[in-house]
Image: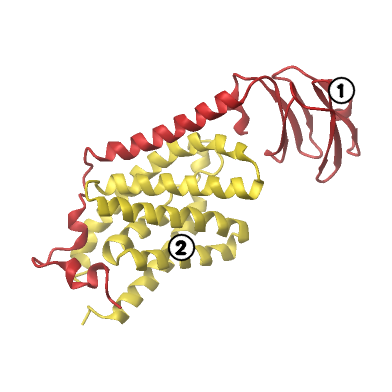
Chain colours: A red, B yellow
Amino acid sequence: MLTEGLFCKKRIGKRGKMEYKSTSLVPKKADILIIAMAVVMAVAVLAFFAQGESGRVAVILRDGVEIDRINLDKAEKSEITVEGDYTNTILCENGSIGVIHSDCPGGVCVQSGMIKDAGKSIVCLPNRMEIRITGASDIDVMVG
Amino acid sequence: MKNTRSYKIALSAVLISLAAALSYAERFIPLGLIVPLPGIKLGLANVVSIFALFFLGFRTAFVILVSRCLITSFFGGFSSLMFSLVGGIMAVIMMELLRKCRIFSIYGISIGGSVMHVTGQILTSMLIMKSYYVLSYLPVLLVSAVITGIITALISAQVLKRAEKAIKL
């Protein structure tokens, strides 16, 4: 049963040294490799998204969580329903997007009309829903 | 006397409860005030994983990790169990592999573990959300993982130094 760890004779070793002694408790040069690996991963992911993200993309969020994402330059006419405390019906058509129907009090989201430019957004506070259009450049902003 | 199975089990039990308590206590550290980003933790429970890995071996460290995840899921819910389990298992496997390499210090091992932890969590959320756009959050988490990895390594190094004197095994 005790085939590994400190309790194993092999690990304690001939000189009675503990296993972790083989691991330095002060930083070594090789540790840079690990940090480099993390940096490479981060850059690769950023490059992947910088490349894939062309044109205007509408991001739909509820409670700050992204629930859908539409490339406005390519998307066909479509309708999306966002359910929460209230129900928003979102229409995407001819490269623009907007809330066409909502049962929320106030209906500010419907009055905002259709939007199509990068940087514009529509917010429905009662339903905590947000539509945001991002351009190719502001990828860092989308992590809301 | 101490070199027995029951001593090992008792020590594991203490470590499980310590890890569970640490990951619960971590919620009260207002890290959000310093870095206003969601989902960033200090990873104090990882100190226990590192300790267990060095003192009790990979298999025991693995069991301690899984038990800790199951216990913390009582006050976190099922989806948080998925996140911590996948992230934690990937982290502990990575740390064992790096330790086997023998060229990395505790800092490299700890950073590697926390990097794999956030990667595992992003992979889980990709599966749950069925969208690969959550991946775009990975670079931010990777940067924070390197920093928190260094912090946990600092703590672990101190713990290991002192534990060697305290636990005369």
Q: Is residue A20 left or right of residue B151?
A: left
| Numbered tag placed on residue A113 in the rendering | 1
The amino acid type, in three-letter code, at marker 1 is Gly
Look at the picture and state if B66 lies above or below B134: below
**Chain containing the residue with disc 1:** A
Q: Position of residue A54 (x, y in %)?
A: 64, 21
User: What residue is drawn where x is 35% and y is 44%?
Assistant: B111
User: What residue is drawn where x is 30% and y is 53%?
Assistant: B156
Q: Residue A88 sits in which quadrant?
A: top right
Look at the picture and state if A61 lies above or below A13: above
Q: Position of residue B135 (x, y in %)?
A: 56, 38
Q: Dot 2 corresponds to which residue?
A: B21
Q: Position of residue A7 (x, y in %)?
A: 23, 72
| Numbered tag placed on residue B88 in the rendering | none
User: What residue is drawn where x is 21% and y is 66%?
Assistant: B166
Q: Quadrant of the C terminus of chain B?
A: bottom left
Look at the picture and state if B46 lies above or below A112: below
At label 1, counting other C-alpha atoms closer than 10 Å, the crowd grade (few under 14, some 14-19, many 20 or more) is few
Q: Position of residue B40 (x, y in %)?
A: 50, 43
Q: Is residue A125 left or right of residue B89?
A: right
Give the alpha-carbon distance from disc 2 to disc 1, as whole Å.
51 Å
Q: Are marks 2 and 1 on the same chain?
A: no
At label 2, counting other C-alpha atoms closer than 10 Å, the crowd grade (few under 14, some 14-19, many 20 or more) is some
Q: Secondary structure at mark 2?
A: helix
